[in-house]
Image (spheres, helix red, strand yellow):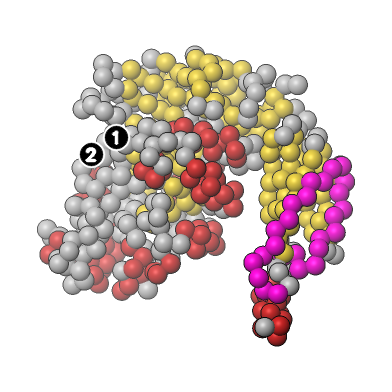
Amino acid sequence: MSNKIIINPYENVNWESWHKLEVDTHCHTILSDGNREPHNFIDEHHNNRDALTMTDHDTGYIEPYLQEGVTGCYPWTELASIYNDIKEMEATQQEGETYEDASEEPWEDRNPDNLDMVAYPGVEASAIRHMNYQFCQFHAGENNNDVEYILDNVSGLEGLAHFVHPGRYTDDDPEDDLVYDYYLPLYKKYDCLNAIEIFNWRVNHANDEYMWDNLLDKLLPQKPIWGIAGSDTHGGYVHYTFTEFVLSDKTQEELKEAFRCGSYFAKNNRQDTNEYPDIPDINSIDVNGTEITIDAETYDKIEWVQSKEVIETGDTINIENLSGHYVRARVINEGEYDEGRCYTQPIVFTPEGMNATEFKIENGNLIIETENVDDVEVTIKKIHPLGLKDIETKTTLYGDSINYELPENCYKASVVFKKNSEEIKWGEIENLTDEEEKELRRKAKVKKMLLL
């Protein structure tokens, strides 16, 4: 059985007319633990980058201007006002100093349009394992260490999020239990969580690339996650790690769409040395049936990667008979001591004919229609009738047309479609509204109290 490509993040790119934007997706100013005033930081990036977000740590607890709807150093046209609001407050990372003390000069406004740059809001939430969220603004406050609270808000505000330098928390072990017990469930649950940082600063955590592969192996073909690069600069060194986005128009709206659909490349040219070999450029990625071809320049080799292994080299690969569900490319320029690197996103494929249709709940029954699926694993979550710990049961169902009666007190069902023992699709569906669930839990607690 031959393969078919089902997700190509570059499918809609017009390589001749679209813009390429070099973007720093991860950096810090004096608002948190950086050493540059925001306007000076912008001026430094103006010489090197086309777009920028200043992802200061946990700026959610700086009350005066966040209550007015501003998160961090955004918008750039209100930096002077932000400074006036907080200048007498104690600087978050400068013990005993106010922001006025810590700043060499008052902050100044900058207009991204006048600089021909794209500005967008972002924050690095230090919730146990750090995560950046962007294109949305809210005040996390005392919930800043609750990653699901943050992701619920990001999702509700139609923002996007990605974990950063994950190797810091896994001892650089891409097989660490955290990959599967912490990161994987969150990627499955939240559509807004759609990327992972694979290059940070000078590639502080080289195995983050392979953690990415491990997650792709578990999430595909249903959900791709994109590999992103950020300098994590706290002042200086803005030039050797960034993400290059390909978009139809140089606007925040189009940049957000590129973030969402994955039309970008992760780039880096420094790891363990002070050498800065040129970073390769990809001119186009052409998909013709099952054949993928990269046109690039300033490179020595192209490696095609799947599941942490190089499976092919050269400008072209044919995925017709490959196993697995994706392939991604590393375009490399070999310097004397280091490499210039440009990494593509995964291009996703499945065997011809593999499909799993949607599912729904009607009148208390779980309705599932399947095609080319071996079995369906259903997990039922029920409220305990006496208000104790929720009850969770699993059952395996078979057939092309399934009508499964949900048990009493069921508030949610999780469905996993399997082919050849491999998960090919999954999802959750609510059986009760929030109000119905709350009422059922209230009744269960009352019943428990009456029996005590």
* Residue depth check, mark 2 versus mark 1: number of the one nearer the observer: 1
User: Foreground residue, 103 or 75?
Assistant: 103
Task: Please give the count of numbered marks on the rendered protein.
Answer: 2
Residue at image position (87%, 46%) is: 401
Which label belongs to residue 12?
none
Q: Is residue 301 left or right of residue 151?
A: left
Q: Quadrant of the C terminus?
A: bottom right
User: Foreground residue, 312 or 142?
Assistant: 142
Secondary element under disc 2, as helix, strand or loop, is: loop
Estimate the x, y position of residue 195 in percent, counting from the top left: 49, 43
Q: Which residues are magenta?
A: 386-411
Estimate the x, y position of residue 263 in percent, counting from the top left: 50, 37
Q: Is residue 20 left or right of residue 203?
A: right
Estimate the x, y position of residue 294 in percent, counting from the top left: 50, 21
Q: Is residue 98 left or right of residue 15?
A: left
Question: Mark 2 or mark 1: which comes first in sequence?
Answer: 1
Estimate the x, y position of residue 21 in percent, counting from the top left: 39, 39
Q: Disc 1 residue type? A: Arg
Residue 370 visible somewhere in the drawing: yes
Residues under labels 2 and 1: Cα distance?
A: 9 Å
Q: Where on the picture, by quarter, is residue 200?
A: top left
Residue beneath disc 2: 237
Q: Quadrant of the N terminus?
A: top right
Residue beneath disc 1: 202
Q: Disc 2 residue type? A: Tyr
Residue 432 part of the magenta-drawn span: no
Residue at image position (75%, 64%) is: 410
Q: Bin the neighbour count of mark 1 within 10 Å (Cα to Cα): few under 14, some 14-19, many 20 and up.
A: many
Residue at image position (39%, 69%) is: 141
Residues tagged 2 and 1 counted as in contact (Cβ below 8 A): yes
Residue 398 part of the magenta-drawn span: yes
